[in-house]
Amino acid sequence: MSLSSSFGSAASAYAEHRPDYAQAAVRWALEFAPGSRVLDLGAGTGKLTATLVALGADVVAVEPDPAMLAELRRAMPAVRVLPGGAEAIPLPEASVDAVLAGNALHWFDMAVAGPEIARVLAPGGVLAGLWNTMDDRIDWVAGLERVSGSAAIGPRDTVTSWRAATADMLVPSTGAAARFESAEQAEFPHGQRRTADSLIATLATRAGMLVMPEPEREATLARIRDFLGSRPETAEGEFNLPMLTGVLRARRLTIG
């Protein structure tokens, strides 16, 4: 099983435990969009879709994994949902004003997906990737990162490293990225109420964890459980997992 195709095996857990996105972050991503038509690309189970709907966007969601699609359709029955991927988007030219990807842009083959995204965007339309990051400037979160390892908490998953990990995804140069103006990055406060059990369940849905051999996976989760049980911030009951939603955005060039 590849990393990018691993999520379907945990679609229901993904739907239950993955966080939504800070509304302020989504508003910033859409700030320069010429209209309200938004494509949620790589929509998964609809975490970003739900935030877009709450903000009044006219949303179409595209997702390649059948199990994730089923969860998305169950959760958001009023939203137009289509099977497809970033490299072959099932929409006509200039049909949306913004393309957003929640924790998904890093999976796209931008040499192919970049021209496809530019094709479906209206002139001046916006492309934005969003990532929910843990605030590892806080001591116990930094400790959790060390204990968990990169399969559970990778470079795009923490406040101190997400910018460097995503900065070059839309760098104007040649080919796909040249279809977009210089990208900007910003962060917006977010958070999620968790228990030790639900945080462990969240980390278990990371791609690196899903493809890990079962004995190694169980050992990693046990190590995380021991750590959370040892910290006063997380040992008992509910706590706030401090997060920020990071956004990388760029506008489609109006030439070419």
Image (cartoon, rainbow, N blue to C red):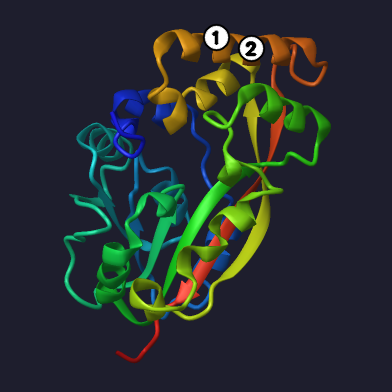
- Residue count near mark 2 (Cα–Cα under 10 Å), binned few <14, some 14–19, many ≥20: some
Marks 1 and 2 sit apart, C-alpha to C-alpha, by: 6 Å
Question: Farthest residue toward the bottom?
Answer: 255
Name the residue rendered at 23%, 45% in the picture.
Answer: 64
Foreground pick, 71 / 63: 63
- Is 123 or 6 nearer to us in this picture? 6
Q: Is 132 left or right of 214, judged from the image as shown?
A: right
Dot 2 amino acid type = Arg
Give me the residue at 54% from left, 28% from top.
Answer: 152
- Residue 226: image quadrant is top right
The amino acid marked with disc number 1 is Ala
Tell me the quarter of the image containing the C terminus.
bottom left
Residue 223: % across, % down: 63, 12
Q: Circle 2 is placed at which residue position?
A: 223
Q: At 33% across and 49% down in the image, what residue appears?
A: 42
Q: Is residue 168 left or right of residue 40?
A: right
Check contact, mark 1 vs mark 2: CB within 8 A: yes
Quadrant (top left/top right/bottom left/bottom right) for the N terminus: top left
Q: How many marks?
A: 2
Q: Position of residue 234 (x, y in %)?
A: 74, 18
* Residue 105, image x, y percentages: 42, 54
Q: Nearer the viewer, residue 29 or 208?
A: 208
Question: Residue at image x 80%, y 16%?
Answer: 231
Q: Secondary structure at mark 2?
A: helix
Q: Is residue 131 left or right of residue 194?
A: left
- Expressed as whole percent of the image width and height from the top left, the position of residue 177 reads 40, 73
Residue under label 1, please give it. 219
Above or below, 11 against 215 in this view is below
Q: Is residue 249 above or below residue 32?
A: above
Label drawn at residue 39 = none
Label 1 CA crowd tier, 10 Å (few <14, some 14–19, many 20+): few
Q: Is residue 211 visible?
A: yes
